[in-house]
Structures are given as C-alpha cells and as structure tokens.
Amino acid sequence: MKKKKYKKIKRINNAMRVRTLSVSALIAILFICLMGRLVYFSVAKNKTYEKKVLAQQNYQSQTLPYKRGDILDRNGNTLATSQKLYSLVLEPKNILRTEQTQKNALNALTKYMDLNRDDLLSYIKDNKDSYYSVYKKDMKYSEVADLKDFLKSKNGKKVVGITFSEKYVRRYPNKSLASHLLGFVSDGSIGTTGIEQYYNSTLSGVDGRKYTYLNEELEQDDSIVDPENGKTLVSTIDINIQKIAEDRLEKFEKKYGSKGSSILVMDPNNGEVLGMANSNKYDLEHPRDEKGLLSKYSQSQINSMTEKQKVKAFNELWKNPIVSNSFEPGSTYKPFTVAGGLEDGILKGNEHYYCSGYKQVGKYKIHCSHREGHGNLSLSDSIAYSCNVALMDIAFKEGKDVFAKYQKDFNFGVKTGIDLPGEAETAGLLHGADQMTNVDLATSSFGQSFNCSMIQMASSFSSLVNGGSYYKPHVVKQTRDDKGNVVSNKESELVKQTISADTSKKLRTYMEETVEKGTGKKAQIKGYSVGGKTGTAQKIPRSAGTYIVSFCGFAPVENPKVVVYVVIDEIQKDSQLNTGLAVEMARDVLKESLKDMNVQKTKK
C-alpha cells in the first residue's frame, strides 16, 4: 500500500508580509481620501451644486421669428414689409423667488416701462406658480427699447423673470394699392393670392431660437441661434403708374359704375408689368373686413349671407380678374387676324372690301357693328373703323388652318406663365382648325366665339407692336437678401417670334390710323403718336344684351414703350356699347405713364 503524499505548506516569509502590509496601507489611505472628498462635496461645494441644479431648473427656450422679405416696386418703394412687435412676458415663479429678485424685477419694470408697481405686484402674485405669463401684447420697439437695453447691462443681468416674445406683422403702407397683384399673408406666414402666394417660399425664412438659463451665480445667460430672414423681392411695378391707373378707375366707377373694370400697363419690349389695377380692390391689412365686400355687394346682401357664402364672396373679391378671368376679346383681336394674313403672304396691304352691314354665313346673317354698313374700305380702314364684314372676308381668304395657326403662334389658348397664381385656363375655349365651323371662323375673326384673359391679350398685343417678339410676362425682376445684396436677377424671357418686324410695322400704322381717324380718336395725346384698337364683345348668353368694352393702346407708334389695356364689364350709367369710355381711360393712363417714364415727345 502506497503512502499518500502531502504538499508542503509555504510559510509567509518577510517579503510577502511587507507587500501585504503595503497594500493594506494603500487601501486605508484611499479610503480616507474618499471620505474626505465626500465631506468636501457635501459641505464645502454644497452651495455651488445647489446653484447649478437651480440654474438647470430655470432653463427656457424662445422662438426668434424670421422677418418675411419685403416687396418693393421697381424704384425701391415699399409695397409690403413686416413690422416686429413685442409682448412683455413675466415669470412670476422666478420673480417671487426671493425678496431681492422681486425688488429687482419691479424696479426695472416701473423705471424703464413706466408700469404701475401695485398692478404688477398684484398680477405676479395672482400668477405665482407660472413660468410664462404675457403681461402686455403687441408693443412697438420704441415702447420696450429702454428695458431691453437695461436687461443687457451688467446690472440688468441680475434681473430674473422678465423676457420679451417677438412676432412680425405684415404691413402694406399703401393699404389697398395693388391689392390683387400683391396678395396678403394668412396666419403670419402663408401667402394668399398674388406675389405673396406665388413667391411664398422665397419671402419666407427660418425661425431662430433663444435659450435662456441661470448660470452658477444665478445670473441670466443666453444662447442664441439667429433666424434666417426671407428674401426681398423687387417687382416690375411702378408705384406711380399703379396709382395713376387706380385713381382713374376710381373716378370712372364713381361716375359710371360697372360690374368690374381693370387696367393693365406693360412694357412691350420685355414683358414687365408696370401696373395692374382693378376696381374691386380691398384693404390688404384687413382682407376679411366685410366692408371690402361693399365694392361688389350691398349691405343687405352681405347681411343675408351665410358664412359659406361670405367665404365664397371673399374668394371672388381676392381673385385677380386680369389673370384669372377670361372673356371674349371682341375687336381688339382684329389686328391679329390681319397680321396672320400679312405674315403668310395672303394679304399684300392693298386689298379693299365692301361692307353692306352684314355677311351671310350659311344660314346665319352675321352683322357688322355698323349696321348700315361701311361701304368700300381699304385694309387699314377695316382696322380703323372696326369692320366685322371685312375681317370675315379676310379670315375666309386665310382659311381655317392659317387662322388657327396664328392664334396659336400668338399664344392664345395657352397660359402665359406669368409669375402669379390662378392664371385662367383657356385652351378648351379655342377652336382648332379641325373643329372650327365656318361660323366659328367668321366670328373668331373679330374676337368672338373664343376666350382669353387680359394678361394673354396684352402679352400677345405687345408682340404685335414691338416687332414680333413675344416675351413671357412677369411681375418680379430681382431678388435680394435681407442686407440688400442682389441674389438673382430675373431676365426677360423671349418665348418666340410671332411675326416679322415688317408685319409689325404695318400693323402699328393701321392702328395709328385707328386713333387718328377711326374708333380710337379719343386716345390722341398731344406730342405723341398713339396707336390702338377698340373692342366690343357681347357676353353669353347673347339674349341678355350685356357687353364688355375695351381698348388696347400703345405709344409712341415708332418705338412703343408702353402698352395700356382697359377692360370694362357692363357699364352701369351709360350705354354698355360706349367704347369711348375705355379709350378715354386708356388715354389718361398712357399720357401719365409716358410722362412718368420720361419718354420724349415724338411730334408737335
């Protein structure tokens, strides 16, 4: 039997004993240090950490609103801007923390804002548990400047519980001027109609943020992320021309009245809109004020409206008829019919026509505006005296294909692409060559049986008189940042060539004769050669006997600088067929526009 072996137990030698004692001593020292540190933090630093915790408990954030971009006229005059308003916000919980914080806050408020001390104290105590109480709203900077400056000072840093909230309110210095063109802002930041809507993303910015907290010394500190302001837009509008047009409309409506009248002023050489005025305007700062509806409805009608009906009425009031409404242009279209024939070589310019007062087209007798007939007419006379029969003869000589081609070439039935919302869709109201009957061709030749908008007509008419260049109409020409630096320029956009310069020159001559001896005599301006074309269109249903009259004029004839287009819907206190009223308005606006633009006189 084998004997069991046992391991020898090593005895602790001196070296091991020394190491053990050293480790134990080190642990003891570390323990003593830790205890000492704990005592230090619990006693010596108690006050500091109390302040840090307190400061964290009073952390706040505040929105810093961006400033919506301004809208200016072409010369830098303000059409729309945003004004900053301030609200005084109190933090009663913080103000009442100690007697000193209460005293500091009340002293600042009464000294720099001239507020009643007793009223303030009563309010603060009534809202003692609140960290956010609006005491006074919508103040201008001048009312809060002194207190804001003090709060930024060394002594002001000791004041707690006083802040300001900020907001911007949209302002329109000229109230209703260019209301349909500009549009307005809803809910502080949403553009509604006009430039405000179309360029909403450009005019809008990004809100900033202000973070406020109490530091370790219980003093107020801020951390700020600045807002990014919106861009400023420079429009093509000339505020003087806009005022001229609106003043003339107002005088007309007071004397004659209408269902609605409008004036459009354009530079024919680049598509810039210089003025866009409508009789049914409204206050841009109070667009939903029912007083604005009085331009279209009686007070009794407004009183009887349901809320739904009022909404519909306001939407109709805000709509820009120059862009959004379509109508039969009437005889203002006749130069286009002639232009197509000249451009295609079908007309030579030496043609003559006979007008007996009507033309038989199939089973229909289509009358001239001059029922007795014009007799013998030259091609230019057919424009000057606005003969329907001559124009029907011209259209039939052109044929449906040629006629329809030039309608499309002049962009009728096609949206212009103007930088405004709500442009009318007229494609479905234009006859294609394959769908056009002889009656359609006959009536279309003098501007009936199809629709267009005012902006369509004025843009096409501009190409008719400027040498044949069709420019895309626009109302904004430049974008700037909030410092005034140019971000981008909107260049004029040449869309197409509609006719030759030679054809354009002939048409200008024909329309000068219209003013010199024809239906547009009242458009004559001393010192200037003026051309233009009158228009009368019977509204649908024809049985109602209601009419739209118009005049599209330009000057100087040799080198047109201004196109003025006037449309009157259902004259109230005179004959609805009185085109002379449209001619007179156009003449007045044209005369003042030429003066405003410093266009030199072209004749004695």
Image: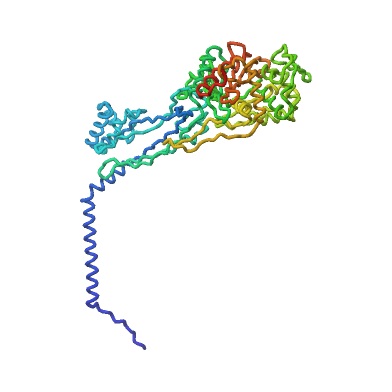
Give coordinates of residue 576: x percent, y percent.
62, 13
Left or right of 202? Residue 54 is: left
Quadrant, the C terminus:
top right
**Does residue 354 appear in the picture of this structure?**
yes
Q: Residue furthest bottom?
A: 1
| Residue located at (45% from left, 24% from top) | 285
Q: How many marks?
A: 0
Q: Nearer the viewer, residue 290 or 320?
A: 320
Which color mode does the image show?
rainbow
Determine whether 492 is above or below 22 in the image.
Answer: above
Q: Nearer the viewer, residue 502 or 540?
A: 502
Q: Nearer the viewer, residue 33 or 83?
A: 83
Give coordinates of residue 385: x percent, y percent.
67, 16
Left or right of 202? Residue 338 is: right
| Residue located at (26% from left, 42% from top) | 218
Give coordinates of residue 416: x percent, y percent.
60, 31
**Does residue 311 appear in the picture of this structure?**
no
Left or right of 390? Residue 479 is: left
Q: Residue furthest front?
A: 604
Give coordinates of residue 299: x percent, y percent.
51, 15
Quadrant in which residue 102 is drawn: top left
Left or right of 138? Residue 412 is: right
Quadrant in which residue 546 is drawn: top right
Quadrant, the N terminus:
bottom left
Quadrant in which residue 556 is drawn: top right
